[in-house]
Image: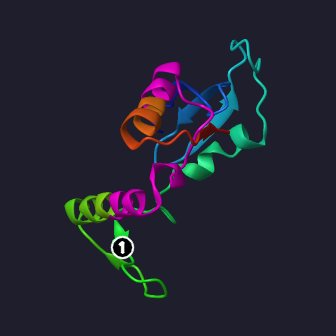
Amino acid sequence: MAEIKTVCCYCGTGCGVLLEDRGNREIALRGDPSHPANKGKLCTKGAALPLTLGLQGRALYPELRRERGQPRQRAGWDESLDYLAERFAAIARRDGPESIGFYVSGQLLSEDYYAFNKLARGLVGTPHIDSN
């Protein structure tokens, strides 16, 4: 029988979670009873964390759709980033920086929010940034 390894981690909402790796891709999950935020309990999001561990249904490489209505096609990282940067800049030139908005996660650290705000307001020039 494989050794069970327990790892402490945090859910996206900030609660403590204990993950047990039982080998052979079997994962058990439970709330961390010593964590002050959830005291061993899990909400629906926390309880569903094992469903996020697999690769099925995830984007594993970039895909581009250059024309509306066309199917996406696999592309390289450099090609994809260059294309997105070009499109982003074209929209800002055509419609102005205030036509761009950012919606960022509510689970970022303060430093992350600071960096995103600097990017949005200072570099892009838009006041439109929101966190859920």
Q: Report the number of numbered marks.
A: 1
**Residue drawn at point x = 63 percent, y = 27 percent:** 17
Observer-nearest of 104 and 127: 127
The percent position of residue 102, horizontal first and vertical second, equals: 54, 46
Q: Which residue is mark 1?
A: 64
Quadrant of the drawing holding the C terminus:
top right
**Residue drawn at point x = 62 percent, y = 32 percent:** 11
Circle 1 residues within 10 Å: few <14, some 14–19, many ≥20 = some
Question: How did the renderer colour the structure?
Answer: rainbow
**Residue drawn at point x = 69 percent, y = 38 percent:** 46
Q: What's the magenta region? A: 87-115
The percent position of residue 31, horizontal first and vertical second, equals: 71, 27
Would residue 96 be counted in the magenta stretch?
A: yes
**Residue drawn at point x = 40 percent, y = 83 percent:** 67
Outermost residue, bottom side: 70
Residue 83 visible? The answer is yes
Q: Secondary structure at mark 1?
A: strand
The percent position of residue 110, horizontal first and vertical second, equals: 52, 20
Left of 84 or right of it: where is 58?
right
- Please identify the quarter of the rendering in which residue 73 is found: bottom left
Observer-nearest of 131 and 15: 131
Does residue 117 sit above or below 48 in this rendering?
above
Does residue 114 sit above or below 101 in this rendering?
above
The kind of residue on which mark 1 rests is: Leu
